[in-house]
Amino acid sequence: MPVKVVVTALLVALGASLFLPVPQNLMTWFENGQSYYAIGEYEYATQEYSKIIRFRHWAVDVEKIEVAVADLKLPIKAAAFYQLGSCYKRLKEFDRAVENYRMVLNQAKVPDDFRATVQFQIAETRFCQQKFLKATEEYKNFIASYPESRFVDKAYFRAGVSLYKAGKYEQAVSIFQELVSKFPESRYAADAAYQIADSYAKLNRYEESISAANNVLDKYANSAAIAKAEYLKAFCYDKLGDYDKTIEAYKRVIALYDKMYEILRASFREGKNVDFDEYIKLYENSFMRIGEIYRDRMGDYEKAYDAYVLAQETVKERDYKAKIQLDIGHNYLRWKKYDEAIKAYGLVITNYPETPYPPDAQSYIGDAYYQAGDLEKAREEYLNVLVKFPDCSTERRAASLYNAGWCSERLSLLLGGPIPGKTGQVGRSIGGIWEGDKRGRKILCGGFHCWRRSIFSDRA
């Protein structure tokens, strides 16, 4: 063969190779996608992964190109579909996420362990989408397809939670019971046992709920679920009208403080998700609920006062302290100790000015004067809501204006005629405070009757 022909052929082959796609192109696109994903640029990441999905060329066998994902070697196209699913999940485009996850399952040479991960992600995506019945179906598919997976107990738990969130409480109980039976040592067993109790409560089967909560306390005494179980028992006893047992259960929630601290600290050391704030809410609410039970259910205002004082001395958050101080005022109001109620509400305003409660406290001062029969002073205090707290909610201002007008109307009836400058002043405030604001007027007018029912429900 002539030398010129050989050289020409070599040059043509070399030139063609420079323009042919090579596996490195796909690897670069995948690495770019991973980089974008890592910094939260999911839209850009999808563009890079999509290049891999769209890639077609006779000279490159894509099936033979692998990349590392989660310590596994995966075909690059399967890895790209998976990462696309994860991107769309992050972007809350859940249907597209599921579509791409399912494409992973259709790829060849994907290890079973990774197929299990993908199926679990499909279920989790439906859960994030709040399509709980679809999520339940996908978790069950996972359980049926991968019964030996280390995530199977979690799949049972998430399936039960999905049914619970869908309002299918009896079905949720069955799933949770199956989890507890098959995996008694699972990290999810205690929470599943609690969810059984909670599901019964949702079904208004309070005796069964109490029994299931006791099971949590007996079998999982060192789990973080015990405080929730005691709190749930208190709720059920309240519903059953057994107020002494209600109070005792709330007291046990409070008494768990030191134990819960140690349990949650140990859980943190073991790498488990811990939420001490969740217990703190139960702890603080238990104080409040004891006061409310004494006040609203039993009519024992003295014990209610003692409970509120103890709560205020114990809790640390200032918003909560202010709310308790407001409840002390409510307790005095129900007790018909109006002077003490006025002082208690005043302390909310002076001691906790940065909290959301001072406008409410000011309005309740008006309530106290009204119930004490001092209509003139009540009217003045209601109007002080607008003077002292002009930026408070539209509903609160509407209620205060209405209440002031109501007081003026009652005074005019008592005095045999309108009060000069009083009723008209309130009327002008109502008409003028949102002049030109149609939405404000609508809220104002619409709020009058509901606020009157709620605030004046005990007034003749």
Image: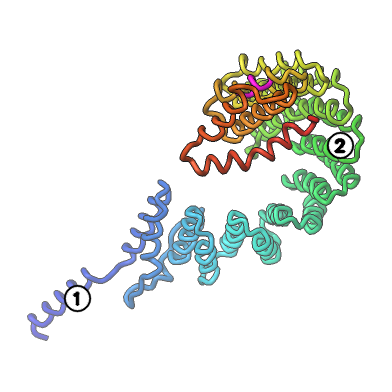
Q: Is residue 14 visible?
A: yes
Where residue 105 sits: x, y (%)?
55, 68
Q: Position of residue 10 (x, y in %)?
A: 16, 76
Above or below residue 378? Residue 41 is: below
Amino acid on which the number 1 mark rests in the picture: Ala
Quadrant assignment for the C terminus? top right
Label 1 residue SS: helix
The span shown in magenta is 378-383
In the picture provided, is 253 more to the left or to the right than 126? right
Coordinates of residue 218 in the picture (x, y in percent): 87, 38
Give the CA distance from mark 2 to mark 1: 86 Å
Whether 2 is drawn above or below 127: the answer is below
Residue 238, which numbered label?
2
How packed is label 1: few (under 14 Cα within 10 Å), some, or many (20 or more)? few
Left or right side of 304 for 142:
left
Identify which residue is drawn at 65% across, 39% down.
272
- Give the residue number, with chain letter if any, for mark 1: 13
In this view, the residue in front, 181 or 286, is 286
| Quadrant (top left, top right, bottom left, bottom right) of the N terminus | bottom left
Dividing the picture into quadrants, the one containing residue 459 is top right
Compared with residue 175, is residue 53 higher up or lower down, i.e. above or below?
A: below
Residue 381, magenta (yes or no) = yes
**Front-most of 5 and 460?**
460
Sooner in the amino-acid sequence: mark 2 or mark 1: 1
